[in-house]
Image: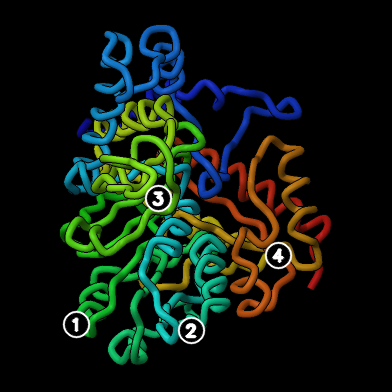
Amino acid sequence: MDNMDIEKIRKDFPILSKKINGNTLIYLDNAATSQKPSAVIDGIKYFYENINANPIRSIHGLAEEATKAYNDARQKVAAFINADPEEVVFVRNATEAINLVSFAFPFKEGDRVSTTYLEHHSNLLPWLRLKEKGINVDIVSISDDYELDMDYYKQLPKNTRLVAVTHASNVTGTINDVKEITRVSHEQGSLVLIDAAQSIPHMPFDVKDIGADFIAFSGHKMLAPFGIGVLYIKKEIAENLKPFLTGGEMIKDVSLSKVIYENIPNLFEAGTQNIEGAYGMGLAIDYLNDIGMENIEKYENELTSYLYEKSKELKNVDIYSGKSKRFNGIFSFNVVGLHSHDTAYLLDKKGIAVRSGFHCAQPLIEDRLKLDGAARASLYFYNTKEEIDTFINELNDIAGKYGRR
């Protein structure tokens, strides 16, 4: 699709015509989850009516069809991020993916893990928990422009086994140079995990080009159903990892005296998986590919520039995003003197859905930005400039009525 027909695209998303308090929904909470196109919604129904069976375990025709659907979904994900299929592990979400690594990685007492102030709790808490096992956790600082201290990565503390970093912040919108962080960290012997939950839905992503060892992302932020996500594991390091869960389908042979485990991805997919979710994720990827990730990135960049330009009209509104060298369609803000929940409530009265609170990034918002919460609007490719106009106008109206310096 060379030119994005936004009105045609919007018709693919039934929920975008929904009325909220008598107003047509303006959905600006895409960093939390994306809406789903009819192709995915109808596809899930088709799966349950025509394919539903437990894959791999049985040889009857329906099970073989389910197995093919599951394997095809893995192939689609692999192609989407330029990985090999055996490097794609299906999980529930990015949170589970990162927790899996924290359990499976062969840490030893005295090892170090590096993470940052920009992280979602999902890429912070699994590492902080390792302190109980004698693992040291370093938190990389950020500048007033929400940029990471890149000099830190050039002189990693001794015994840093893993560098964990977000590709794009869900609060400041900062897009980190993960390729450079990976390169420098590898030079010093550290492996790299990237939380790509806020980037892969919005831009082309090539795991081989970036070079990281682990990539985590969620399906529900990229048009797929809830409960399906991906952990990419570079196959060269997989043999050093231990299983996270044990049970069916992750073993080659079992006796009461010996267990031989499968290789990845089966090693980390114990039990019956979310087959329907994987199938839906494959359909979501088909939809994204039809539009083209380059087209999506270009259009969203235009929307983001438009949003920040329009935000100059705002009075009595503080903005906490969009200051870094590269940033995405995250717009975090507060009406001065008004709690973020009150702002979100008032916007919802006009049919505008935004997020409010700590955004699962409490250390960043509370400790670094010194806030008790923030409201956040976040864009996706089905949003329009007209929606941004309405949002800015309503926000200005709220700030005029309730804001105070």
Q: Is residue 309 above or below residue 279?
A: below
Residue hosting label 4: 373
Residue type for callout 3 = Phe
Nearer to us of marks 4 and 1 is 1
Q: Amino acid at mark 2?
A: Asn
Name the residue located 32 percent from the left edge and 10 percent from the top edge: 62
- Which is nearer the N-term, disc 1 or disc 2? 2
Q: Determine which residue is flagged by label 2.
A: 136
**N-term mark: 3 or 1:** 1
Q: Is residue 142 visible?
A: no
| Mark 2 or mark 3: whose residue is earlier in sequence | 2
Residue at 47%, 24% (x, y): give it: 13
Question: On the rendered image, what quadrant is the N terminus found in?
Answer: top left
Q: CA distance from mark 3 to mark 4?
A: 25 Å
Q: Residues within 10 Å of mark 1 (few under 14, many from 20)?
A: few
Asked whether disc 2 touches disc 3, contact meaning CB atoms under 8 Å apart, the reply is: no
Which residue is label 1 attached to? 187
Residue 264 in picture, x, y percent from top left: 26, 48
Q: In terms of sequence position, does the residue under pointer 4 or pointer 1 come before the other?
A: 1
Nearest-to-viewer mark from 2 and 3: 2
Identify which residue is drawn at 64% across, 50% down: 355
User: Residue 86: image x %, image y %?
Assistant: 21, 44
Residue denoted by label 3 = 217
